[in-house]
Image: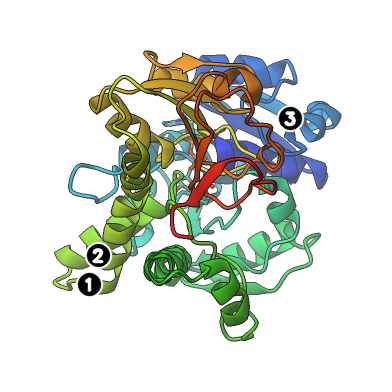
Amino acid sequence: MDITIVGAGYVGLATGVAFAELGNNVRLIDIDREKIEKIRKGIAPIYEEGLQEMLQRNMDRIKAATTYNEIDGIVFICVGTPSLPDGSINLNYVKEAVENAARNMEEGIIVIKSTVFPGTTEKILLPLVKRHSNKISIAMNPEFLREGKALHDFMHPDRIVIGARDEKTAEMLKELYKPINAPIIVTNPTVAELIKYASNAFLATKISFANEIGNLAKLLGIDVYEVMKGVAMDHRISPHFLNAGIGFGGSCFPKDLKALRAGAASAGYNMRLIDAVLKINDEQPLRIIKILEKYMEPRGKTIAILGLAFKANTDDVRESRAIPIIKELLKMGANIKAYDPMAMENMKKIFPEIEYYSSVEEAIENADACLILTDWKEFEEINFDAMKRKIVIEGRRILKNKEGIIYEGVCW
Ligand SMILES: NC(=O)c1ccc[n+]([C@@H]2O[C@H](COP(=O)([O-])OP(=O)(O)OC[C@H]3O[C@@H](n4cnc5c(N)ncnc54)[C@H](O)[C@@H]3O)[C@@H](O)[C@H]2O)c1
């Protein structure tokens, strides 16, 4: 099939490259010239497991452009939906992308993959499409992939949700996804939109729940990881998203929960549970600083920060828990030596003033303390001998060898 992807970011690029791998012709459109230039040369502009290789082997089926001419067939809208100050989403990118696509199409389907609040596709985007043509249908197909595992998740999803307004559109999308072995739920766009928010809200709630139990467990001198191992063996709960730590970040959970809360408030409902989940998450990273303060006054001290990405296996730093921690340490007058295997270039845009090192060894040399904030595999085994004081505090449980160091976990 002929597929156009508008927005070649983490979701759009992975989706486009994966659809090409399945044998479709894919045109990627993005307003970012630099990104498009890289893709044209077969270079993935982001780090994602297997993306570079899959892009290269499908270059004959992939086109990339900053303009929209000649689009037809199925158009996926994958542009960002960032938060506005009140928590609701900024729909400008989606509206612009939908309008541009509709203006350049004769007929076909516009599929919204960006995460949008229930009612957006029907009430806001459909009227925009109808202004240009009655031959274009609209659908909502939320994305559930995880960054770092995006291609794997695209090829092996737990389910595919198609929110369509008519049978023909639903059938075409089912046909497109036929090579993927997963259950398909066909529903309307509004239900599809809420399935996405409810899924993310539930997963984020599991994390804040694990952190709440973790905070209590630490006070009681209990290992929360041992507790959660026992909890997770209940098939109704499952072991996923129960790792206590410094909380969730990334481009989705914080933004989506805030959007859900703001949208609910506009509809006249106060989401107290979501409010609590976000509050716990906001407080969690700062707990690591409270622990650090038990050992030293951070002013003038050198603190090594290992891990800047919001999680392992990505270069994405959006809403990374490292951000509030670094901000607070800088405010307190600490010197920061940072290292991350993939995310340093992105973090330099947020904190150009801190020092970045190209290895763990260089970052921890002569440091007064070390905070581990992302669970990159290479942090499992570290030799801390070169530190000035071997004080190590973990925000994610990853370290295997703790011999000869003063060690604490944020909630263990
Ligand atoms: N990142 C994830 O893990 C994930 C998972 C599921 C769903 N989502 C949702 O998918 C959407 C995209 O997320 P992302 O992480 O890929 O964002 P991103 O910021 O990585 O990518 C968005 C891309 O859209 C481009 N863009 C913006 N306006 C445009 C326009 N008018 N025309 C063409 N291109 C335009 C940007 O230049 C950028 O490259 C969001 O709604 C997000 O909530 C993200």
Mark 2–mark 1 contact, CB under 8 Å?
Answer: yes
Residue 376 vs 304, above or below: the answer is: below
- Mark 1 lies on residue: 272
Q: Residue at the far right: name it.
A: 57
Q: Mark 3: which secondary structure?
A: strand
- Mark 3 lies on residue: 62
Amino acid type, residue under disc 2 in the picture = Asp
The location of residue 227, given as percent across then percent down, is 55, 76
In the image: residue 21, left or right of residue 110 = right
Label annotation for residue 35: none
Please identify, in this view, whether the residue under mark 1 or under mark 3 is nearer the observer.
1
Residue 167 vs 154, above or below: the answer is: below
Is there any visible trace of residue 283 in the rendered image? Answer: yes
- Mark 2 lies on residue: 275
Amino acid type, residue under disc 3 in the picture = Ile
Quadrant of residue 208 within the rendered picture: bottom left
